[in-house]
């Protein structure tokens, strides 16, 4: 994610097996099947180079070492199609189907937002009062950083509570799992720090899975039910998400439906997946079909045409940004092209997911992969948007060609670049096998391609890099371009 990628007989067996990964359990009407094929064969980079062939789902899965992909497309408030590709578990030779369950990561927060709003709708919570009014098994310890301001539930859901702990790494199967109170206090065996104030609440958006975990405890304390039980009865089941659950660890009866997680290099996550006691923030197991039911119900409720869980009034509140101009209550509101969408991404150990639902017109898409490499999700989203005519959603930058730059010139670009010498953050440019590589601390980054001798771009990310020289011809800085963002970084070595 962008912060500011044997023996001959065995190889032959893998190649033969790979051709069977696309045999599906359901066929659709011929016109829908044609759309599916278009989506599979038109994946989109942020950069389009004239004359290059279209990207295919099969080739991109192979390129990114992605074992499995699952997609659902929504059109006119209905699921148009849902399909799985590749392996849910390559060792067990289990194919991904539309029923295969993936870890949703932070998409868990969207459904959690529905659960909290259900309690608000039932007059059991008030969004705008102190969270400690509802917490009974633990109290949030205010300190001087909160400047006398109280954290409310709307702050928690919109990441405007000014709290610490961005996200959670989860726990390997077999590890000792901490309680919620231990997690919130940062006490062993918790593997994250305490959830505390970093700035005063209500000041600005500052993403905090820790804050979402406080809302999980509020649901438990107020409903007097285990979180997963409350969410199943009041949110998942009524919405038609019949295969989804928040139970951690998963029940043994569900094991054959679970995808195993994989790293960017294709290596399987130890124990197949991690356990997330931070259920509201990262613990949902689901699939694109079930998430499509959630999206459709949200869209219909927004139109006043359904109220399986929330009324039109509560849905409007949930989809209205709070303090921030994008962060609403468990979702982010974003305009892409001619349409406004509610959306969220998610990433657990070995899993990445993304969904979009249009605020009008009843269109949407969900993509889930059992890989740490989430770049392919954006390429699939771009294809769906193109095939289904979502105007302005995907606007690739057109490039006439990629040129080859001599290696002696590339070597001059190698080094670290900072805005200021004292900054901890830096951009690193390296050369690997004749390829120019962009990276950041704790992130491997991506390959850079040349449009001109000193002008480079990424194929996977909307990023451009221009290298500048001084009067003597020495490289002194790079310019970073990403949409309207343009920054200069000085070469430090």
Image (cartoon, grey):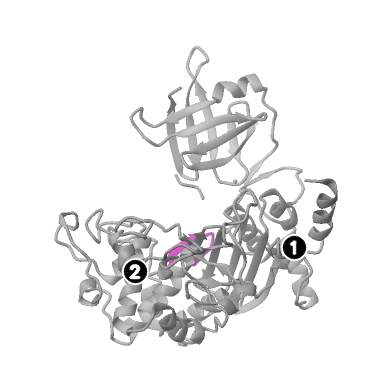
Residue 38's disc is 1
> Horizontal and vertical percent for residue 438?
55, 36
Q: Nearer the viewer, mark 1 or mark 2?
A: 2
Question: Quick one: label 2, few (<14), some, or many (20+) residues within 10 Å?
Answer: some
Q: Quadrant location of residue 287?
A: bottom right
For this rendering, which residue is in front, 410 or 184?
A: 184
Counting residues from the start of the chain, the first of labels 1 and 2 encountered is 1
Tell me where the magenta segment starts and ends, as one range: 331-342
For this rendering, which residue is in front, 159 or 405?
A: 159
Residue 62's disc is none
> Horizontal and vertical percent for residue 87?
70, 63
* 337 with respect to 16 (left or right): left
Q: CA distance from mark 1 to mark 2?
A: 46 Å
Residue at image mark 2: 180
* 5 with respect to 204 (left or right): right
Q: Quadrant location of residue 135?
A: bottom left
Prevailing SS of the magenta stretch = strand
Residue at the outermost top position:
472
Q: Is residue 77 visible?
A: no
* 348 with respect to 32 (left or right): left
Q: Is residue 131 visible?
A: yes
Is 31 within the magenta?
no
Query: In the image, what residue occupies the spot 32% across and 87% down?
Result: 122
Query: In the image, what residue occupies the spot 41% across and 57% down?
Result: 167
> Horizontal and vertical percent for residue 353?
55, 62
> Horizontal and vertical percent for residue 28?
76, 77
Query: In the image, what residue occupies the spot 40% across and 37% down?
Result: 425
């Amino acid at each position: 994610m962008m912060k500011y990628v044997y023996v001959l007989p065995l190889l032959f067996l893998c190649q033969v097996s790979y051709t069977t990964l696309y045999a599906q359990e359901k066929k659709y009407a011929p016109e829908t099947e044609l759309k599916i094929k278009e989506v599979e064969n038109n994946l989109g980079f942020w950069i389009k180079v004239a004359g290059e062939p279209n990207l295919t789902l099969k080739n991109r899965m192979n390129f990114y070492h992605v074992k499995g992909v699952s997609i659902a497309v929504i059109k006119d408030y209905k699921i148009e199609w849902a399909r799985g590709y590749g392996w849910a578990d390559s060792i067990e030779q289990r194919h991904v189907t539309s029923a295969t369950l993936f870890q949703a990561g932070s998409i868990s927060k969207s459904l959690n937002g529905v659960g909290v709003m259900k309690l608000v709708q039932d007059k059991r919570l008030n969004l705008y009062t102190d969270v400690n009014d509802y917490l009974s098994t633990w109290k949030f310890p205010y300190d001087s950083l909160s400047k006398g301001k109280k954290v409310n539930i709307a702050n928690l859901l919109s990441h405007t509570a000014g709290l610490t702990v961005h996200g959670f790494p989860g726990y390997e199967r077999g590890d000792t799992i901490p309680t919620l109170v231990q997690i919130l206090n940062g006490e062993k065996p918790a593997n994250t720090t305490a959830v505390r104030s970093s700035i005063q609440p209500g000041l600005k958006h500052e993403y905090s899975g820790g804050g979402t975990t406080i809302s999980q405890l509020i649901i438990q304390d107020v409903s007097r039910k285990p979180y997963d039980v409350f969410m199943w009865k009041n949110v998942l089941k009524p919405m038609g998400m019949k295969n989804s659950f928040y139970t951690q660890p998963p029940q043994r009866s569900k094991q054959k439906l679970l995808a195993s997680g994989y790293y960017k290099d294709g290596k399987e996550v130890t124990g197949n997946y991690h356990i997330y006691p931070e259920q509201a923030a990262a613990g949902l197991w689901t699939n694109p079909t079930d998430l499509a039911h959630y999206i459709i119900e949200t869209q219909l409720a927004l139109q006043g045409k359904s109220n399986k869980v929330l009324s039109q009034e509560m849905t409007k509140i949930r989809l209205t940004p709070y303090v921030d101009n994008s962060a609403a209550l468990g979702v982010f509101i974003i305009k892409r092209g001619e349409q406004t969408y509610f959306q969220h991404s998610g990433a657990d150990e070995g899993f990445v997911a993304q969904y979009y639902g249009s605020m009008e017109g009843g269109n949407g898409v969900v993509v889930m992969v059992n890989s740490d490499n989430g770049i392919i999700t954006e390429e699939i989203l771009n294809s769906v948007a193109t095939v289904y005519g979502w105007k302005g959603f995907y606007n690739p930058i057109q490039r006439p060609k990629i040129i080859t730059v001599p290696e002696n010139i590339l070597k001059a670009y190698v080094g670290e670049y900072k805005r200021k010498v004292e900054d901890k953050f830096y951009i690193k440019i390296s050369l690997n096998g004749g390829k120019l590589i962009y990276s950041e601390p704790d992130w491997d980054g991506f390959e850079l391609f040349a449009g001109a001798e000193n002008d480079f771009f990424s194929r996977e990310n909307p990023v451009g890099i221009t290298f500048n020289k001084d009067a003597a011809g020495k490289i002194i800085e790079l310019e970073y371009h990403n949409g309207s963002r343009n920054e200069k970084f000085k070469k430090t070595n």
